[in-house]
Amino acid sequence: MVKVENTKSIAMSDSIINLDHGDPTAYEEYWRKIGDRCTVTIRGCDLMSYFSDVNNLCWFLEPELAEAIKELHGAVGNAATEDRYIVVGTGSTQLCQAAVHALSLLAGGTEPVSVVAAAPYYSTYVEETTYVRSGMYKWEGDAWRFDKKGPFIELVTSPNNPDGTIRETVVNRPDDEEAKVIHDFAYYWPHYTPITHCQDHDIMLFTFSKITGHAGSRIGWALVKDKEVAKKMVEYIIVNSIGVSKESQVRSAKILKVLKETCTSETENFFEYGREMMKNRWERLREVVKESDFTLPKYPEGYCNFFGKTLESYPDVTVGVFHVLTQAFAWLGTKEETDLVNDLRRQKVMSRAGERCGSDKKHVRVSMLSREDVFNVFLERLANMKLIKSIDL
Amino acid sequence: MVKVENTKSIAMSDSIINLDHGDPTAYEEYWRKIGDRCTVTIRGCDLMSYFSDVNNLCWFLEPELAEAIKELHGAVGNAATEDRYIVVGTGSTQLCQAAVHALSLLAGGTEPVSVVAAAPYYSTYVEETTYVRSGMYKWEGDAWRFDKKGPFIELVTSPNNPDGTIRETVVNRPDDEEAKVIHDFAYYWPHYTPITHCQDHDIMLFTFSKITGHAGSRIGWALVKDKEVAKKMVEYIIVNSIGVSKESQVRSAKILKVLKETCTSETENFFEYGREMMKNRWERLREVVKESDFTLPKYPEGYCNFFGKTLESYPDVTVGVFHVLTQAFAWLGTKEETDLVNDLRRQKVMSRAGERCGSDKKHVRVSMLSREDVFNVFLERLANMKLIKSIDL
């Protein structure tokens, strides 16, 4: 099996470490080992046109990327791709805005459509739905507290960013035609969570960044059931950026293809590699947090269809088919009345304030996807904070 | 010198030809000849992070692209880059929206800032400033007719899209601090227009698409004098798409570097190649239009500093240092009372309606940047329309 290399920790230097963004550089080592199989070569005369496939509703989607996406979902079993439109975006960030735009437009009313998400939520949703001050939709905050009449959109992230909970809609309006849902499945992959079933919703968002770690490519995709919604999303992306980088599309197609090929490999399975690394990091983090004032969510164990199907026949594989969530972010809390983001900042650790996620000062979101040396420094500094507390007592 | 190959015209088939978009596939042939010098190779482990340079205000801008941009402007002499911030965008489309957003935000008022452009204008400006129904800015149409009080933004495209005129601001409010201008210099390059002076404005937009023909890469850049404006543009792009494809950035950096190197070449000068091709196409188009009911704008001759500086010492070079505009679009008109976009559609030629550009039914915008065979079919169909008219008479 692929071994996770624990790069030796760099000395506790003075440098600030930034765990605010979920920059997924943790996976670089794996792709270095994969070598030339993911290398793309693009000639000067390639990929010049705006158009990828004039016969596709999403005419700026490279056909080989569409194919790779369908094959990967098929192999992992995490989402249905049959009878759906694939819309490619400049990251799922652009797609989320395209979907909110499309649903608001199709709601057809004069009042802005409400947009909600259950707290704690991905803080960027707030910025995405407010920064242009659109008259078409309005951020209404925590879905748990939402009781307005009229059309609304609920953003459901599962596993949730920041706290890793498995989510369904919380606004309970069955058969309400004005209720629309966007499912953000950025983290519904086997290295983060047990794949318990194949998702099958109206609008499902995925991002290349968080699957393989290629954040710099800015590639995301939406699986969309309704043709009109897909069409309006495409129209949004045309006006917003006239399509999506072809270079990023052909490269992500190649990498996703290799990813799919490794799915059945005993020695090179990316998801197994990622799962091992994340499990190792979470165990080490829980060890530091143990018997301290810090808190972390507890996750139940689940049976993973993916590992069950693909890896049970390999005796050497250490990843179990039953496993718990190993989310890309730690939702770190404290039992004390303190401003945790500032406490961490004093230790030169940048994190995202819980308040930005609709929660409180006692929580922060910390990326678990940094390079190994940075993660080690983070653990050292956290242990140091714990130590300072003990001395205080 | 580099010869323009006139690919044999395809037979007058039944297929529709799309000259609505300015898809710049005309330049593929040149890049094919340039060969491996523009080939980029990207390994699986490259370009994974969101960040390109954490010390740059525009932290998602690849340093090699910034360097290539500065060197190219230096060699061509079309725009000043000293003491400016470079902001990279997913095409200049995203940057134009980022600039409108930034200027509106900094205007700080409660009323939407007016956005205007002198007709005929780039039709996409209308869509860009209306589709999200922002409360921050409002499209107010033709700048020639604009007389509202309060803060406003004038979009100045020079040479203008669609009609190729050389433009300056038309809203005359000298020393008005509420007057802001965004200069779109997509076509201020030597293959389209004489480079008469080095532009030096507050916000200048450029796009890779229209320089080299690499529209699929979705790369544009802004040269911005004011730090606060640049900062707000960067913030817009972060929320809109968390930066810009790294693959496209490294590829465009490489191609722009080669472009700059050819600037002083007697045999491979891209701008000379482009200029020859465009001149040839315009001459053939004018030949068809001659003694018909169609009209085309007339352009004055100008001295091109670029060709003057770089090519005068090469006796074989046929491009003159005095030349007229050979715009990427033809602003085709008709003397008759007719709906020209429909007339062309009946001949299976798709073009952009003059009305969408703030003009009238008697004008259309036709791309001059198609592949050679498509351009030839266009000329044949246009000649055919002329013939039909003669028979009618």
Image: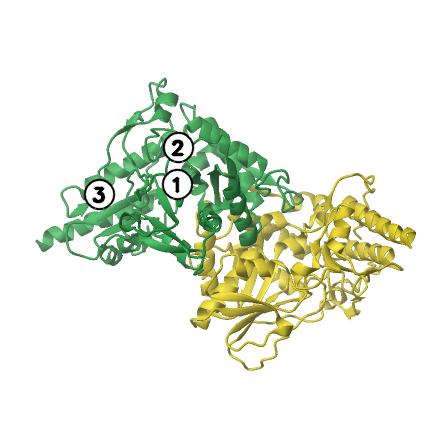
Chain colours: A yellow, B green
Q: To which residue does mark 1 refer?
A: B183
Query: Do residues under tags 1 and 2 come within 8 Å of each other at their CB atoms?
Result: yes
Write the residue at 19% across / 50% down: B384
Q: Nearer the viewer, mark 1 or mark 3?
A: 1
User: Do circles 1 and 2 both sit on a common chain?
Assistant: yes
Query: Which percent across, then down, holds residue B39?
Result: 54, 37
Q: Nearer the viewer, residue A334 or B284?
A: A334
Query: Do residues under tags 3 and 2 come within 8 Å of each other at their CB atoms?
Result: no
Mark 2 is on which residue type? Answer: Gln
Q: Nearer the viewer, residue A133 or A217?
A: A133
Residue B206, quarter of picture: top left
Q: CA distance from mark 1 to mark 2?
A: 10 Å
- Looking at the rendered structure, the secondary structure element under dot 2 is loop
Q: To which residue does mark 3 refer?
A: B296
- Looking at the rendered structure, the secondary structure element under dot 3 is loop
Q: To which residue does mark 2 refer?
A: B199
Q: Residues within 10 Å of mark 1 (few under 14, many from 20)?
A: many
Mark 3 is on which residue type? Answer: Leu
Residue A117, quarter of picture: bottom right
Q: Nearer the viewer, residue B331 or B153?
A: B153
Q: Is residue B157 visible?
A: yes
Q: Is residue A5 visible?
A: no
Q: CA distance from mark 1 to mark 3?
A: 25 Å
Write the residue at 48% across / 27% down: B261
Q: CA distance from mark 3 to mark 2?
A: 27 Å
Disc 3 sits on a residue from what chain?
A: B
Disc 1 sits on a residue from what chain?
A: B
Q: Residues within 10 Å of mark 2 (few under 14, many from 20)?
A: some
Q: Earlier in the sequence, mark 1 or mark 2?
A: 1
Disc 2 sits on a residue from what chain?
A: B
